[in-house]
Amino acid sequence: MDIQSKRVYDPVEKEDGVRVLVDRVWPRGLSKEKLKADLWLKDVAPSTTLRKWFNHDRSRWENFKSRYFTELDAKPERVNQLHELATKERVTLLFSARDNQCNQAVALREYLQSSAE
């Protein structure tokens, strides 16, 4: 599976493949034309409660991932949809968080890769 993550504010590249926005809310200041997302899977994003609890606090990262993975376990249809896309072509998970290493797209990529094994 070829899955990468990328900030929504980074330039669109041909190598992105299928661009999937995985934020629950639309990124501030971006039009649909500028973002160029092929899909917006807001229901695969962390719940509002979990997102607010995490608040991009790196000390909560491992606990956040564990809770988020539990939420993803309850959404097999979305997980399967992403698996299927990623077996056909590259999937770029788009996120708006400032932190490039501790965000839902990075966690989702980890989840998808580990659940495909």
Image: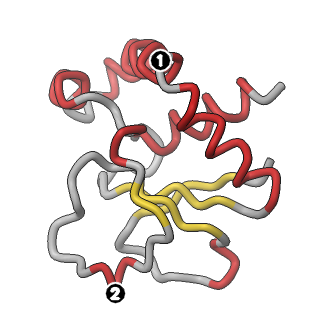
Task: Please tell me whether mark 2 sits on a helix, a strand or a loop.
Answer: helix
Q: CA distance from mark 1 to mark 2?
A: 32 Å
User: How many labels sit on residues?
Assistant: 2
Residue for point 17% across, 23% down: 49
- Give residue 83's position: percent from left, percent from top: 70, 42
Position of 87 with respect to 92 (left or right) is: right
For label 1, count other residues whose C-alpha is less than 10 Å away and answer few (under 14), some (14-19) or many (20+): few
Residue holding disc 1? 74
| Residue in front for this viewpoint, 30 or 59 | 30
Residue most extreme to the front: 77
Residue for point 73% across, 47% down: 84
For label 2, count other residues whose C-alpha is less than 10 Å away and answer few (under 14), some (14-19) or many (20+): few
Q: Which of the 4 quarters of the picture holds residue 57?
A: top left
Residue holding disc 2? 33
- Up the image or down, 91 lies above or below 62; here it is below
Position of 52 with respect to 40 (left or right) is: left
**In front: mark 1 or mark 2?**
1
- Give residue 39's position: percent from left, percent from top: 47, 63
Q: Which of the 4 quarters of the picture holds residue 31?
A: bottom left
Task: Please tell me whether mark 1 sits on a helix, a strand or a loop.
Answer: loop
What is the three-letter code of the residue carrying label 2? Glu
What is the three-letter code of the residue carrying label 1? Ala
Quarter of the figure with the C terminus: top right
Position of 103 with respect to 97 (left or right) is: right
- Give residue 67's position: percent from left, percent from top: 39, 14
- Up the image or down, 95 lies above or below 38; here it is above
- Up the image or down, 33 lies above or below 83; here it is below
Residue for point 40% across, 58% down: 40
Residue for point 25% across, 23% down: 50
Choose the circle earlier in sequence order: 1 or 2. 2
- Give residue 114's position: percent from left, percent from top: 72, 25
The disc label shown at residue 104, or none: none
